[in-house]
Image (cartoon, grey):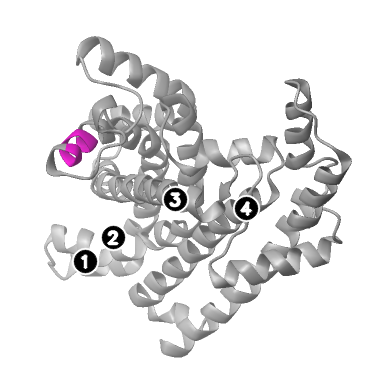
Amino acid sequence: MLAFIVRRLLYMILTLFIISIVSFVLIQAPPGDALSAEIQRLRSIGNNVSQDQITALETRYGLKDPVLVKYGKWIGGFVKGDFGQSFTFRQPVGDLIWGRLGFSVMLAGGALIIGWLIAIPIGVYSATHRYSLPDYVITLLQFIGVAVPEFLLALVVLVFAARFLNADVGGLFSVKYQDAPWSFAKFVDFLKHLWIPLVVISASSTAWLTRVMRANLLDVLNQQYVQTARAKGVLERRVIWKHAVRNAIHPLIMALGTTLPVLISGEAIVSIVLNLPTTGPLFLQALLNQDMYLAATLLMFLSMLLIVGNLLADIALAWVDPRARSAE
């Protein structure tokens, strides 16, 4: 198991290195930059920006350096925890993303936990009660959950919560707690706002995972070892949960690595609609403004989430099924 984890970690480091090169080059590819846009804005409001000032700013931020030199400076600082300066916000990138990244990971992780806690028991019930009325209802809800876009669901939940529940919608905190230090009252206020984005973000993944669990369990229930266990008089509950579910859950574990980034992207859309202080709106603004250090850093962190998700999925699968350790 240790050798398996070490191999995966080496693959992860190599993959992150390749991603860092590709992402930085792609972000540098479009013409223009955030500093040029800022100079145009200053000139449009009447500020006289001389050529000497422009040259000093370009030298300070290395805008005239070759792409490889820029990449070397950025990746060297990234390893040390210095992610560069945001041209758009005029702040260090680290100060901008740490709080937002925490909220993004918490929302995506919470949605993932909710999805698994709901999908597995409902998928098992649907498979063991095939073609019954509850199974048809569950299947209908699955199709609706997969088909409805996140932004539309966010708007529906937003209107429902505001009109029928008199809930304070939008954001993760009430106005009086937005800039206040953490306290028990702020934490309670945070929980009151948290359920709306969690419901919206987890809806699509929960519906999809439930569908996958149902289909896989139906296949496993027809396997010979399940029929043999039943013939030996093993309790049906034990046959289902100890033997069948353990093998049917493999595809869900393998999908864990891809589910996390999908939840992150869904969180970005929901955050724009619900005005949440997460990385999604910040990443979109960085790309629109060509804020290269901010955009590249956020892209790297999102890629790390994808790779870490795959690593955790590989470890979980190897723990559930030892055959996966020697599959390479």
Say which of marks 4 and 3 sits in front: 4
Image quadrant in which the C terminus is located = bottom right
Q: Which residues are magenta?
A: 186-191
Which x, y percent locates residue 71? 75, 64
Residue drawn at point x = 56 percent, y = 72 percent? 80
Q: Residues within 10 Å of mark 4 (few under 14, many from 20)?
A: some
The residue shown at (76%, 21%) is 46
Question: Could you tell me if the residues under marks 1 and 2 are in contact, i.e. CB atoms within 8 Å?
Answer: yes
Q: Indicate whether 185 appears above or below 149.
A: below
Q: Amino acid at mark 2?
A: Val
Q: Give x and y (percent) for residue 164.
A: 21, 11
Which residue, given by chain and number where applicable, does mark 3 sit on? 101
Looking at the image, is mark 4 or mark 3 earlier in the sequence?
Answer: 4
Q: Mark 3 or 1 closer to N-term?
A: 3
Q: Position of residue 185 (x, y in %)?
A: 13, 37
> What kind of residue is marked 1?
Lys
Which residue: 75% across, 27% down?
47
Amino acid on which the number 4 mark rests in the picture: Gln
Q: Residues within 10 Å of mark 2 (few under 14, many from 20)?
A: many
**Disc on the earlier residue, 1 or 4:** 4
SS of the residue at dot 2?
helix
Q: Residue at x 74, y 69 (%)?
A: 72
Task: Give yes or no for residue 84 being in the magenta stretch.
Answer: no
Q: Which amino acid, mark 3?
A: Leu
Q: In the rendered image, which quarter is residue 168 located in? A: top left
Q: Which residue is mark 2?
A: 245
Residue 5 has which mark? none
Whether pointer 4 and pointer 2 mark residues with C-beta atoms closer than 8 Å, the reply is no
CA distance for labels 1 and 4:
53 Å
Give the mark nearest the N terminus, 2 or 3: 3
Q: Which residue is mark 4?
A: 85
